[in-house]
Amino acid sequence: MRREISIALTVLLPALTGCTRHMLDARDLISSLRATSSLATEAGVFITYLGSGHSTATFARGHAEYLVRELEDERRELQGAGVDPSLRRSLEVCQSQQEQLGRELRRLESAIGRPDELPEIATRIRAIGTAAAQAGKGL
Amino acid sequence: MKKLLGLTLGIMTALGGFVDFGQIVFTMQSGALFGNRLLWSVLLGTIAIIIYLEMCGRVAVVAQEPVFSVVRNRLGYGGSLVTLIASQLLTVITCAAELGGAAIVLHLLTGWSGKLLCVAFTAVVGASIALLQFKWIERVYGLAGLAMIVFAVSAAELHPDLNNIVAGLAPHLTAGKPPGNLYYYFFAVGIFSAMLMEYEVHFYSSGAIEEDWKTSDLTENFAVAAFGCVLGGVLTIALVVVAAMIFLPKGIYPVLLSTTTLAGALPLGRAGLLLALAGTLACLTGAAIETAMSAGYNACQFYHLPWGKKLPPQKAPVFTALWAGTLVVGVLAVLAGVRPLTLVNLSVVFGMVLMPLTYYPILRTAMDKSVMGRHVNRKIDTVLGGVILVLIVVAAVAAIPLMIVTRSGTP
């Protein structure tokens, strides 16, 4: 009985305390790139909606804030994660796309109410989305 | 007029029950991945919940036994205690998800702090349960949920391909497109589960007793169950169609409540946005009330303790403590930073696993002539109920493996 408990503790404790390094596989990276591309496209649709003038100021600010937060959650999942050496480059690409998108989403958040800045942000976000989607397909 | 208002129990049960946070996000994700191909799962879920709501309403009226009393009688003490504990956990998780979702919607409406709004919203929900009579709870939140019709209007405004929608209502065994069959089955099970969440039958059967339904009301029982569920089913189909037309072509996989609301608002302008937010808030409020009250109903019915809105709190102290406690635990979970969407995924999948333990006793009691007398199931009720129960068992067995393999459906 004691042996079983010690085996269980050996397996469970590192997992519970977060001591093990989270290993990612190709599927994780594809999923992460897809999420980045999806968020970028979503932000593009949102900017188009803002341009229509139908949004309320509180909804616009709130939705921009949730987009930023969602990307931060995605980024956290990759932070400190380990990958097989063959996937290291893909991980870097993924992190880079997320970083760029994070920057643009924060810019979008602060540009709510300044419609003249939106087209430029939309163009950059679109480019990030396309790059993330292509990187995902290449994996 | 009174009979018309009687429909609000069905409307609130269905809108708060299966047009809740879980269903809104789940169905829109399914539409974003598979277009209208999973509409059959909505249709199946709607038929299933109509059949079982009618059955549990009938059992409640004829045998004067709400669902958890039936569960205890049929499963014995041990089995029903496990069901009770699991149901209570599930109810708390779902309630927390609804409170968190409502805080998001309120933040989008007002711009105020989400946590502060969550606390204030929970207080309003608690005050509604404490102060309003049962009939007013169902009328206010059932009718407010009708604002969700804006999603059906949005779907119509997008001019969807009706042939494609009709084709989607017929079951397809395979996904026919990426991300593949396992994801397709996961979403089929998830939609089916979200439409049959246990707290719907707990709330509905308890509501029938709260409202003093008599056997002479049994013809209305079917109308109430069917009207509410068909309305909920149509709105759920609208959510899928909107997602299929807005998200699928662009490759968007929605994970935010604000995104799903935006999709409903896109074709309709500012009024559409406000209605979509109001409708979503009403449904989440209804769901929060249903789950909190179900926690009180379940335990009291299991232990044969006094329960119900008609009793003053001091005469039903356990009932009062349980619904209030559920709200408190729910709000604390949200304040602790647990993501509502994580809670939703948990509740939908684990709800499916638990479902046979709730639905089997209802079917057994409804087909028992010694309990139901002349109101016993007709052969067709038993056959349909049995077929649905088999599907529920299959889905329950598949739910957790599918969740693990598909990582909760994340493509």
Image (spheres, rainbow, N blue to C red):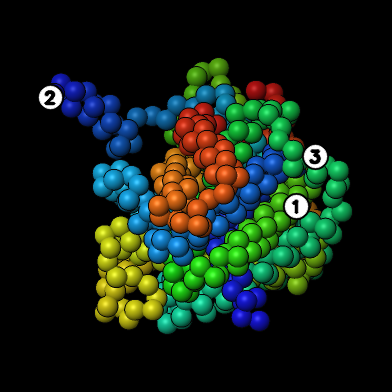
Residue A35 occupies quadrant: top right
* Residue B306 in picture, x, y percent from top left: 29, 70
Q: Where is residue B63 in the image (x, y as percent from the top left)?
A: 41, 61
Q: Which residue is drawn at 63% across and 73% down?
A: B143
- Mark 1 = which residue? B242
Can marks 2 and 3 be said to lie on one chain?
no
Q: Identify the image quadrant of the N terminus of chain B.
A: bottom right
Mark 2 lies on residue? A2
- Is residue B109 visible to the viewer in this orientation of the structure? no
Whole-Å distance between the Cαs marked 1 and 3? 16 Å
- What chain does mark 3 sit on? B
Q: Which chain carries label 2?
A: A
Local SS, label 3:
helix
- For disc 1, the neighbor class at 10 Å (few under 14, some 14 to 19, many from 20) is many
Q: Of residues B207 and B35, which is closer to you in this image? A: B207
Q: Give the amino acid type for the residue marked by disc 2 in the picture.
A: Arg
Classify mark 2: helix, strand or loop: helix
Which element carries disc 1, helix, strand or loop? helix
Q: Are marks 1 and 2 on the same chain?
A: no
* Quarter occupied by the C terminus of chain B: top right
Q: Position of residue B333 (x, y in %)?
A: 38, 58
Residue under the point 50% across and 19% down? A84
Q: Give above or below for B383 relative to B132.
A: above
**Amino acid type at image mark 3:** Ala
Identify the residue at image location x=51%, y=77%: B135
Between B367 and B295, which is closer to the camera in this rendering? B367
Q: Mark 1 lies on which chain?
A: B
Residue type (three-letter) at the residue carrying disc 1: Val
